[in-house]
Structures are given as C-alpha cells and as structure tokens.
Amino acid sequence: MIEIIGPLKQGAVTPGGKPVPLQKQLIERLQQAILAGRLPAGASLPASRLLAAELGVSRNTVVIAYDHLLAQGYVLADRRGTRVSPLSSHTSGAGVRQDAVAAEVAYAARLAPFSAIAPHSGTTAVLTPGTPALDRFPLAAWRRSLERAMERALPDLLGYGVPAGEPALREAIATHLRMARGVRCDGSQVVITEGAQEALNLCVSLLTNPGDVAWVEDPGYRGAKAAFNLGDLKTVPMRVDQEGMAVPPEAWRDGPPKLIYTSPAHQYPTGAVLSVARRLELIAQARRAGAWLIEDDYDGEFRHTGEPIASMQGLVPDAPVLYVGSFSKTMFPALRIGFVVLPRSMVAQTQIALQELLRGGHRLEQVALANFIEAGEFGRHLGRMRRLYRERQQALREALAVHFEPAQILGGNCGMHLTLRLPPDISDRAVVELAQQQRINARALSGFALQPCDEDNGLVIGYGNTPAEQIAAAVGTLALCVSEVAGAARGGRRGVKATEHASRSNQ
C-alpha cells in the first residue's frame, strides 16, 4: 500500500505554516489514489492494524481515515472488509489526467448575445461613462448616517426585512420623487431592489411570459436588453432619433408589445429627450394594447441647462408606467440600492409575488440612506455634483473641439457623458480596444445597438469620474487612437486597390 499512496510525513505543514495531521494526510492520499484509479473499484484495503504497522502510525489514525472515507462513499465496509466503491467511470478505473482540459461550458442560448460585449477597463480608467466622481462623495456625512442607523436599530436590522424594502427609505424616496421628478406616488408603491438591474428583472418577472414581445431603444441600454433576453422575451429594437424612441405606427398593429423600455429624460447613450408628444402617444397606445412602459430615469437628476425634465410617469393619472431608478450614479455604485415605483393598481396584486421574489436585504444601508435623504445631505450632494459635472462637461467639449474638429456631439444637457460620432470607415470598437490599453475607458456606440447602422459608429465618453484638468490629455490620447485606426483603415483600402489594379493588369 505504501507504494500506492506514499509515506506519511511527521511534522508536515501547509504552505501557510499550519501542521497537517497524519489522519488528514492519509485521507487525502487514499482519496487521490481512488480518484486516479490506482485503487480501482472493488479493491480491498488492508486491515487497519496492517496498514497502521506499514505506515508507522497508530491504528486509531487508520480507523478514523477509513470511517471518513466510508462516510463520503469512497469505500464500502462489510464482513469481508473495506473495499473501494464503484465510482463513475469518468473519475475512476482508467485514471484521470490531472492536467485534463475542462470541457467548454454549454451556456444557455439566451446568453449568446453577451459574448459580443467586450470587457472594459473598470472604474479606475478615465473617461468612463456612468461612473460618478467617487472622490467627491461626502463620506463623513454618509458615515454619520450609518452610525445613526446602527445606534438606533441594531440588532433588529440584522434579521430579514420587509421584501419591498425598509418603510423609512420607501417613504423618503417617494417624497423626493414627488418634489424633484414629478412622480405621482407614495411609499406603498416603491419597491427597493438590488440596483436598477434587479428592478428591470423584477418588471420582467411580474409582467411577462416567455415569448412576449418587448421593445427597447436602439441604440440603448444593454441592461434592459439583458433583462428581456433572460426573460426569454422577443426583443424588438426601436430606433432613437433627436426626439427619443421613434415607434412606427404599424408596429402597434404588427407586433404589439407587452413591455416597452425607454429612458425619456436622458436617453442612453444618445442623450436625446423624449418629446412630450411621443410620451403621451406611448402612454395612450400602451393603454390600448394592454402594454406596460418601463421609464428608466437614467441620469435624470443631473440636468445642466434649464429646469429638470419631469417624469413621464407623472404626466397623466394612473399611467401604465413602472418608474425605475437607482443610487449608483447619484451616490456610489457599490451601494447597490435601486427601486421601482409600481402603478397604484399593481400594489395589492403583487404583494404575494414580491414576498417570493425578494428578501429585504441591505437593511442597515437602507435605513442609513433614508436618514441621508431626510437630513438634506442627498439634495446638497446632488447640487454639488451638478456644478462639478457642468464644469467637467465644458472641459470635455473644449478638448473635443481641439482634437475632433469638426465633430458631431450628441447629448450634453444632462448626465455624465457625451457621445461623439465617428466616420463609418473608422471602427469604434477598434478605437476602444486601443484606448483601453492607455487606461481610457470610452465605449463603442455600436455596442449599444441591436441593429447597428452607419450612424451608430462613435464613442461614448464619460466625464463624471475624470477631473477637468485631466480631460484634455485623455482626449488627445483618444484622438491618437482614432488616427491610428483611421490610418490602418486607409492602408487596408490602398492594399485592396493595389491588388485589384494588379489583377486587372494581368488580365
């Protein structure tokens, strides 16, 4: 047996310096021998006294090891002794190569579209869309809110909470939305979620069945497409123009939807504002078709010119609109608190479903956030960030004017990003790949489109996480990446033309 499992080592230690008991060594050696096929199914193990004498250990060490293997099913024990169990042929018998390559994971077909999305450099890179100025967040005020929550409510907050979220936070959000966003709601309609993405997933779970039709903006937010895809919905792209989502009249007749996703206050990534005429038309048509609208108030708090754009949900009473938001942009992404405001008609009907779908976590953070809002800290923080982002956007516009003249820039009245259109012959994805090597995290506009066209070629450039004094240099580097891709494209075209010329000459 010692030839099969090797000798045990007195005083053996782990890489971290912890001692390894002899019985643990013996258990692991026997398991490895069985899994590798050196001890095949049906092989008899030596009696405990004999193996103890051979290994130079106490009999009790061997008995403990055998009992452990028996409990896990590696061995069988009866009157004939201890024998190796018949394990799966994939893990025993002929042996298993320790360096065998793992089989490719067969993911669900609904995940196939995600493979085309390129990874990005993360939030530490400059010009990252959707990332706020984390270094300007008022940590001292947030710490005080956390301490108040801990002083007043522990240990009760350590248990499960109300599935829809802490009542104090739901009321605080409802009050803020009524005043700042024109949303018609009270706390009973607010459901707290794990960020905006869970809010979108919840809308899909509550209101659709597999195969239902859903409309999304194109180009548009990838998270909405992911939620619809994971719900096995038939996702239909609707083009976006300067007035937001443009729905052809025949679409309501030919393929009426169950869900419609739109970001009316600040469309992502084009920055368009959905006109009031289209908002009212969407609401009216949705009512006729029995459809529901998801209003994602992306970046709606950061309006840079004029008065804030009010919500679509508050335009008319009892609109068939589910209003979705989060604190990832207004506070910080790691908070992972979002919400959905349900239509009043849905509140009573969804109570049982919400109890099954949600568990009411992050209670301490929810109570702290309620205090942060009620104390006025949230409003003051928003005011500071609006001023900061206006300054950073102006720096970005000036840099783009220097390095990309002439430039077609989309958006700008709201949010934390601008979108720069590129000529169709300059691959935005190639530019982004080069830029990421320089820690510049602009995104490819074409990556946001389900059905990309020439006008969907461009760069989505964030300024929220980049100080104004760093923007000019970063845009200069981005311009060099564009020039390099453009040069490669021109060289490729010259090569094609030369080949065609040589071919004609030889004819």
Image (cartoon, rainbow, N blue to C red):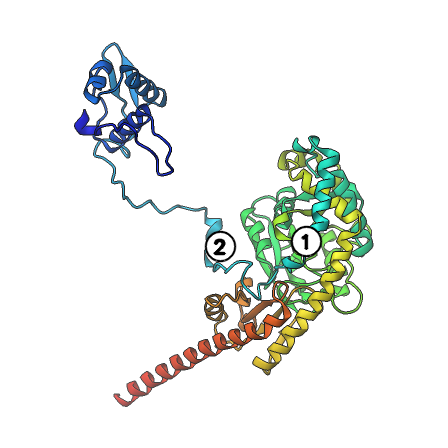
Label 1, residues with CA under 10 Å away: few <14, some 14-19, many ≥20: many
Question: Which residue is painted at 21% across and 34% down in the image?
Answer: 94
Q: Which residue is mark 1?
A: 331
Rendered view: 15 above or below 462: above
Q: Tell me if 309 is positioned left or right of 120 in this view.
A: right
Q: Quadrant of residue 282?
A: bottom right
Q: Tell me if 494 is positioned left or right of 10 in this view.
A: right
Q: Which residue is mark 2?
A: 114
> What percent of the width, then of the height, locates residue 187?
78, 42
Q: Is residue 101 visible to us here?
A: yes
Q: CA distance from mark 2 to mark 1?
A: 28 Å
Q: Quadrant of residue 33?
A: top left
- Amino acid type for the residue under numbered disc 1: Met
Q: Tell me if 350 is positioned left or right of 84 in this view.
A: right
Residue 191's label in the rendered image is none
Q: Quadrant of residue 240?
A: bottom right
> What percent of the width, then of the height, locates residue 368?
72, 43
